[in-house]
Structure formats: C-alpha cells, structure tokens
C-alpha cells in the first residue's frame, strides 16, 4: 500500500521523470501459469472439498450431528475453506503473507492484455470493469429467478413449483438482488470514476479495492450455493425462528451475507479514504462532484452499518454450527435480536442503494440541460442528512413485531423526517430541470425515469412509515411494489443512466442510440406495467412469498407476469446493444460525446494507467454550463503546483 | 528498493510536486484509514454489546444466565492482561520511537507479538474450559460470540504489530544510514504513520477489551 509513498523524492530539478515502458514478466507466476480466475476456481473447489472433509472429521461424532443426518459444521467449513481457497487462488493473500516477512510481492505487475480482467488487478479502472461484469452476473441471475416467480404466479391453482421450491426461489432472488444492488453503482462506477472525478491517479488502497471485488464475486458463489443445499425458506430477510429451523442452505445465506459484507466494508473504506485524501489540489469540498458526494455518503454507510450485518451473520452461523442460541428464544436468545441487527444494517442499506443513484442523476442532468446543478450544496447536504438519519429508522421494520408499541411514534417520526433530505435531493433535480432545454439522450431519459419512479416509490414510502398504513399493508404486495419502485425504479435505472453515459469513456466505444432507446422505453413502460398493478394487488390483500392467491386476483397477476416477461426482454435488448456496440460493430466514441465539463472527460481515451499526465489543479466545480465567463475547470499543466495559473485550460465549452 | 516499486515509479511521469502530493495523500490515507477502521470496529463491537444487553434485558424463559454461570475468570484475566500489555508496549514503543529509540520500539513490538500470540492461544483454549454448553443460555451464546470476535481481533492486532516490525527491518536495509526509520525518506514517513495508526487501534482495542471483560467476567 505504499507504492507511491516509497518512491524516492530526492529530486532537485522540477522536470518530470519520463515514463519507462514495463514489459510483461516472463517465467512462473506470469501469463496463464500465474494466478487468475481459473486458479481461483480450482483452489476454491479444493478448499471446499478439504473443508467438508475437515468438518466431517471433526464433528461427525457430535451427538447433535450424528443423529441429524446433516453436518452443519462440515457445510460451514466447506464454504469457509472455499473462500480461503479462492483468495489463495486469485492471489489476494500474496501480499498479506509477504508482508509478514517484510517483503514486497513480486507478482503484482501490470498486465496489459485481456487477461488482466481475470486477475487480482490493482488498477481501479480494471476493477471497475470487473465489477460491471460481476453486477450484471448478479442482475441477470436474479432476473431469471424473478421470471420463475412471475411464472408461478400466472395461476393460483396450477403450479409450476411446489410451495417449498417457490419460497426458495423467492428467497434466492431477493438475496441475490439485494447484494447486487448494494454494489451496482459503488462497485463499477464508483471504483472507476471517483479517482478520475477527483483528479487522483490512483486509489488510496488498491489492494483493498481488488480484494473487495473478488470478495463480492465469491460471496455470490456462496449465496448461490444455497440452491443445491435445498435453498432457504426465509426470504432475503432471514428471520428467525424460520432461520433456526432451516436446512443447510441457511448457512450459505448467513455466511454469504457475512462474506459480501466484508466486500462491502472494504469497498466503502477504500472509497471514503480516497475521496478524503486524494482530491486534487484545489478540489475543495464545495467543488467535489455530486456523484462523489453520493459515493462518499454511501461509503460512510457501508463502512459503519455493514459490520453489524457481519456480526449478525456470524451469530447465525454460530447458532447453526456451534449450537449457540442467539436467535433461539427457548434457550435464552431472541428471534427479535436478529431483526434488530439485520435491520440496523438493512435500513441504511436502502440508502446505500439510493444515494449512488441520486449521485448519478445529479451528475448527468446538468450535462443534458446545459444548466448548473441547482442548489449544489443542498444536494450534498441532503445526501449527508439521509446517511445520518438512516441509522435512526430501523425499528420501523419491527412495527409489527418486537417493538414496544410506545416506541412506534418515535420511529414513525424519524422515518418521516428522512423524507426531508430526500426531498431536498429530489428538488435539486427539479430545480435543474426547470426551464431547461433538455437534450433527450438515452442517459437523460433514464434519469427522467428515475425521478418518475422514485417519486412513486418515495411517496408510498412515506405512507408506509405511518403505523396504521404499515400495519394494514405489512407483508403484502404493496410493500413489495414500493421497494421495487425505489430500488429498481431508482437505482437500476440510474445505473443504466450511468452506464450509457460513461461507457464511451470506459471502453472508448459508443452505445447504439437506437437500441438504447428501445431498451429505455421497453424497460420504463414494462417496469411500470409490472410493478404498478402490485400496489392494487397488495391493497386487495395478496401476501408476499406465498405461491397461491385469491382467484379474483389472477387477471392482475397475469398482467403483471406478462409485463415482467417483456421487462426481462428489455434487458436482453441491453445485452444485445452491449454486444453489438462493444464487440460486433464497435464505433469509436468522440473524446467527449456529451460535452460534459466533468473532470473524468478531460483525460485521454483510453485512459492512461495513471489517469492524468499531470495531477490537475482544480479551479472550480464542474457545473458551470452555459455561464459566460465561467472559470476554467482545472489546470492540467501544473503537476500539483497550486500556485500556477494557466491560460489554456481545456474542458469548458459553455454552449 | 524492491523490483515492483522500481517498476511502478518508472511507469509514471512525476514532478517533485506530484511526488510530494502523493506522499501527503498516502500519509493522510494511513492516518484517516486507521481512524475509520476504529469506527468500523466500534460498530462491530457495538453489535455484540447490543446483543448482550438485549438478551440480558429480555431474559427469555429466565435463561439469560441461570445460576450466574461465568466463563473461566482466570482465562479472562490472563487474556485481558496480555491485551493491555501489548497496548502498553505499543504506546511505550511509539514514545521511544519518537525519540529515536528504534531498538526499544522493536523490543516493545516483539513483546506485543508474543503477548498477542499467547492471548490468542488462551482465547482458543478457553473454549475447552467453559463450564456451559454454548446454547444453554443467552449469556453462554453471547460469550461464544465474544470469544470468536476476540480471536479475530487478536489475530488482526498481532498481525499488524508483526508486519510493522518486519517492515522496520526491511526499511532499515532499504534506506541505510544512521537512523533510517526516523528519516524523511517516504518509506520511513509511511512507516511512522502506520505505527501511529496501529498504536491508536491498540488503544481502542484495550478500551473495548476493558468493557467486554467487565461485561463477560465481572458483571
């Protein structure tokens, strides 16, 4: 972690040191004989086998295991050693082990070919693209499971799955999607663009960044491993006592959450420290791009709320393996303890998912309205306010259980309070759109959809925070529709806005506009057709996680299911667009296709390994669109010399 | 200078100002990273403390702590004392390091490493000596949770001290001269920032251990 710091500085002249080309290394440890995804999979598999054997060796004679037909210790150790094997195979442990002997690792060199995407790479841009593939893997897996759910709900009496299989599918869908959603922006776009937007040449802790991605990926495998074990019947919330009664698939859920929690903590930690310390000279807090504010506030939540999830998962695993009774009421534990710990993380998590989306939208709309971001400071304050308040609302998830009724008004109030900073952020967007000449490019359309969807999701959220409404619609499709509007309607739409906006910078190729428009309109229309009817379905009394329902709700459900298939189709249009634009018929992107003032667009494409030839000196914030005589964004010639001025500063084109 | 670092520094064009900026940013990252890590760990410990008091106040089935069973106090005292020793050594070592007493710091760290290792072994061994089944009560469950998290903490702390120690030997060879660890060489500055962060974290660990020791062994 000390690469730059350990460079000698005894240089007296002020001339830059010229770069020297570095060849890819030869010999053992390089190329395909080195450590990469393949070796990680092999080592993970071997770890799994070893862990299972060890668990059987240790615990098969324990009385509670010998007679149960299920060795939870072996199940857990198999997964734990699988994760360790994965880390060994990918090379994540090379540096920590070498450090113990005071050595620097020799293998971490810059790979230049396509193979770098399959390795433990320390370049934040590579990690960002790795994350893009990773989150799409999550998204499409979860999406397929969603299709299975909607297929089952086509008919209340004719079943494709039995009740047990259905709840396993629902649980896996929810968990995969929630874990995906925590990283969908922070992982790909946060890691890729935060250093570029703050004028940094690197992340603060590149190894921790790479570690977070490979942890995220193995977390996916752990959670998905529940299916062969018979899944888990608890939904994504994992409530006890169902959790305690569940089979071995529950261990995958609990341990998987803990593993992904580690990935989330490390990702947030690295991003927060990078923003605090690596902002280019002149980038004061009032000049930080609003997307970076979104990521910073999210990173704060990730680092502080996720340790509680880690603990909750650890306690659950101990209940399963060591026979403790954290969540077993009959033995002195409490099922409500899980609910408290889970939601102490779980509600900030909602904002972990929302804030980066707000950041993306706030970053993009000035570009397409050619107006400065309205009330920039209010947007930043709103994000901080949401992040702070999110720690004080978790008990509203317990309105129906595990809470003193006298405490309900307090948490109703805190929950309603959070709509104030959220409203600030929303109004910042409206203020920017007001009287603007909007360019309706694909990213902008997705941004507009975010406002439309989030308005519905947000308003129903305010309803749900009220105890009487909450008690009435709790556990039904109304709630389900509400959170799909906020998470999918807000975050996933924002993710696509960001992807369409920034992919030309990431890959140097433009996305096909016609296919992009098809993608947007089908996704927007069918998303609303899928989820809006669910408000009515919920108000008419259909509960979540149940594979049958009243006969009179079938036409609503069929409408929703058919819309869901078409919604799924819209994602295939995106995949087709991605394949077509990036691989089959690539078209080179202009240097700055949207005429953005953002710092990330002012460096070369493809982006150099160290982002900027010279560390820029920031002169102003990046939102001075259409302002005559606006100051130049940055000085790119000074190389961190803060007392320099420049006559020719690229970047501001006040059209 | 290790091969990797030479390659890294050769691969980028840098002015002296940029190097200085990068160094400041790096030192700042170590400093703020150490503090943020303490904040993360606070939430981790807080979840355990919350669980303890939640189950204690719930006392479901009057099974919070039947017969006031307690984990072996001798182990508790021993582990707690060793954590305190490692912390005191870290603070003493840092004070000596500031005055140029590198050897004293290294000796303090060696003591810290051994204290951490012994505490770790005792914490693991304590599992064999607890007078209750893990799921027999709320107290026993939270104690097992505490022991597992404490093992994690002890591994982390010992690893941190050991790697700082190993790094000090490497830097001495790398930089050379009279007082390499006290020089203005970037490696030495980075090293001192790391020692500072480590010492603060140990201080936090000692405080948290005091609270947890009181909860599980004294209350």
Image: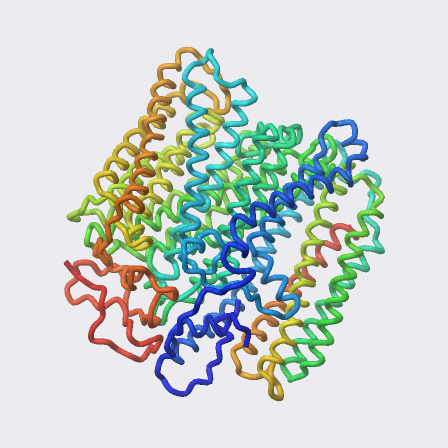
In the rendered image, residue A272, in percent from the top left (x then y), is placed at 46, 59
Q: Is A637 placed above or below A382 here? A: below
Q: Is residue A496 left or right of residue A442?
A: right
Q: Residue A184: give x, y in percent of width and height.
A: 42, 45
* Picture colour scheme: rainbow
A296 on left or right of B184? left
Q: Measured from the top left, where is residue B53 in percent x and y? A: 68, 44
Residue lying at 65% horizontally and 39% vertically, measured from the top left: A316
Q: Is residue B114 above or below residue A538?
A: below
Left or right: residue A396 versus residue A240 is left
In this view of the protein, which residue sits in the foreground, B48 or A270?
A270
Can residue B58 be seen in the rendering of this structure?
no
| Residue at (71, 54) in percent of width and height | B151
Where does the C terminus of chain A fall, quadrant-wise?
bottom left
Q: Nearer the viewer, residue A526 or B57?
A: A526
Q: As displayed, is residue A628 above or below residue A490?
A: below
Judge whether A620 appears above or below A304 on screen: below
User: What count of labels does the image hold?
Assistant: 0
Determine the image quadrant of residue A605: bottom left
Tell me if I can see residue A610 in this picture.
yes
- Whole-percent x and y of residue A178? 47, 39
């Amino acid at each position: 972690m000390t690469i730059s710091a350990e460079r000698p500085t005894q240089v007296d002249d002020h001339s830059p040191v010229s770069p020297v080309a570095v060849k890819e290394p030869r010999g053992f440890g390089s190329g395909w004989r080195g450590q990469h995804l393949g070796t990680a999979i092999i080592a993970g598999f071997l770890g799994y086998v070893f862990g299972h054997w060890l668990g059987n060796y240790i615990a098969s004679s324990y009385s509670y295991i010998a007679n149960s037909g299920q060795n939870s210790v072996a199940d857990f150790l198999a997964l734990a050693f699988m994760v360790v094997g994965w880390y060994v195979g990918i090379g994540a442990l090379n540096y920590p082990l070498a450090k113990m002997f005071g050595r620097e690792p020799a293998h971490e060199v810059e790979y230049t070919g396509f193979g770098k995407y399959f390795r433990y790479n320390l370049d934040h841009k590579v990690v960002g693209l790795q994350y893009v593939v990773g989150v799409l893997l999550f998204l499409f897996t979860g999406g397929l499971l969603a299709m299975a759910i909607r297929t089952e709900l086509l008919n209340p009496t004719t079943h494709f799955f039995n009740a047990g299989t259905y709840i396993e599918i629902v649980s896996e869908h929810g968990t995969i999607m929630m874990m995906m959603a925590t990283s969908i922006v922070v992982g790909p776009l946060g890691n890729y663009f935060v250093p570029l937007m703050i004028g940094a040449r690197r992340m603060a802790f590149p190894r921790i960044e790479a570690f977070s991605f490979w942890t995220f990926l193995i977390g996916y495998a752990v959670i998905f491993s529940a299916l062969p074990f018979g899944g888990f019947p608890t939904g994504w919330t994992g409530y006890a006592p169902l959790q305690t009664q569940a089979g071995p698939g529950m261990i995958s859920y609990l341990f998987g959450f803990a593993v992904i929690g580690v990935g989330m903590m490390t990702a947030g930690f690295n991003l927060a420290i990078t923003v605090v310390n690596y902002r280019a000279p002149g980038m004061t807090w009032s000049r930080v791009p609003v997307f970076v504010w979104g990521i910073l506030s999210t990173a704060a939540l990730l680092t502080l709320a996720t340790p509680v999830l880690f603990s909750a998962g650890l306690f659950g695993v101990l209940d399963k393996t060591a026979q403790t009774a954290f969540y077993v009421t009959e033995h002195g534990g409490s099922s409500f303890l899980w609910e408290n710990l889970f939601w102490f993380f779980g509600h900030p998590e909602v904002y972990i998912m929302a804030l980066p989306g707000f950041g993306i939208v706030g970053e993009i709309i000035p570009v397409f309205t050619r107006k400065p971001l309205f009330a920039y400071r209010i947007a930043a304050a709103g994000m901080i306010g949401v992040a702070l308040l999110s720690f004080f609302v978790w008990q509203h998830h317990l309105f129906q259980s595990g809470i003193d009724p006298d405490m309900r008004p307090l948490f109703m109030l805190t929950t309603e309070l959070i709509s104030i900073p959220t409203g600030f952020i929303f109004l910042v967007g409206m203020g920017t759109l007001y009287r603007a000449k909007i360019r309706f490019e694909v990213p902008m359309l997705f941004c507009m959809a975010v406002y439309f969807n989030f308005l519905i999701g947000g308003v129903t959220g305010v309803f749900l925070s009220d105890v009487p409404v909450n008690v009435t619609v709790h556990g039904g499709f109304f709630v389900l529709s509400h959170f799909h509007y906020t998470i999918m309607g807000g975050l996933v739409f924002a993710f696509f806005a960001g992807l369409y906006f920034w992919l030309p910078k990431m890959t140097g190729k433009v996305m096909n506009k016609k296919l992009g428009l098809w993608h947007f309109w089908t996704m927007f229309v069918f998303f609303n057709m899928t989820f809006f009817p669910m408000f009515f379905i919920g108000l008419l009394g259909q509960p979540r996680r149940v594979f049958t329902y009243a006969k009179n709700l079938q036409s609503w459900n069929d409408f929703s299911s058919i819309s869901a298939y078409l919604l799924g189709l819209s994602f295939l249009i995106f995949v087709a667009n991605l394949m077509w634009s990036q691989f089959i018929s690539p078209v080179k992107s202009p240097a700055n296709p949207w005429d953005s003032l953002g710092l990330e667009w002012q460096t070369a494409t493809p982006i150099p390994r160290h982002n900027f030839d010279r560390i820029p000196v920031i002169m102003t914030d990046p939102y001075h669109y259409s302002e005559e005589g606006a100051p130049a964004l940055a000085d790119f010639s000074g190389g961190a010399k803060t007392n320099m001025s420049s006559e020719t500063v690229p970047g501001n084109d006040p059209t | 200078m290790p091969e990797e670092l030479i390659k890294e520094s050769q691969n980028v064009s840098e002015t002296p100002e940029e190097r200085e900026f990068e160094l400041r940013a790096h030192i700042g990252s170590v400093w703020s990273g150490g503090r943020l890590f303490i904040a993360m760990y606070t939430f981790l410990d807080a979840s355990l403390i919350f669980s303890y008091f939640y189950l204690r106040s719930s006392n479901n089935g009057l099974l919070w702590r039947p017969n006031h069973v307690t984990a072996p106090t001798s182990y508790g005292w021993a582990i707690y004392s060793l954590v305190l020793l490692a912390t005191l050594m870290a603070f003493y070592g840092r004070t000596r390091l500031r005055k140029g007493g590198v050897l004293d710091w290294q000796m303090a760290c060696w003591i810290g490493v051994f204290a951490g290792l012994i505490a770790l072994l005792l914490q693991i061994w304590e599992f064999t000596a607890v007078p209750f089944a893990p799921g027999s009560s709320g107290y026993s469950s939270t104690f097992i949770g505490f022991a597992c998290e404490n093992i994690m903490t002890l591994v982390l702390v010992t690893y941190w001290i050991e790697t700082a120690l190993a790094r000090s030997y490497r830097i001495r060879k790398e930089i050379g001269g009279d007082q390499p660890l006290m020089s203005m060489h970037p490696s030495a500055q980075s090293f001192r920032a790391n020692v500072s962060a480590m010492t603060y974290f140990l201080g936090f660990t000692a405080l948290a251990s005091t609270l947890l020791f009181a909860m599980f062994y004294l209350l």
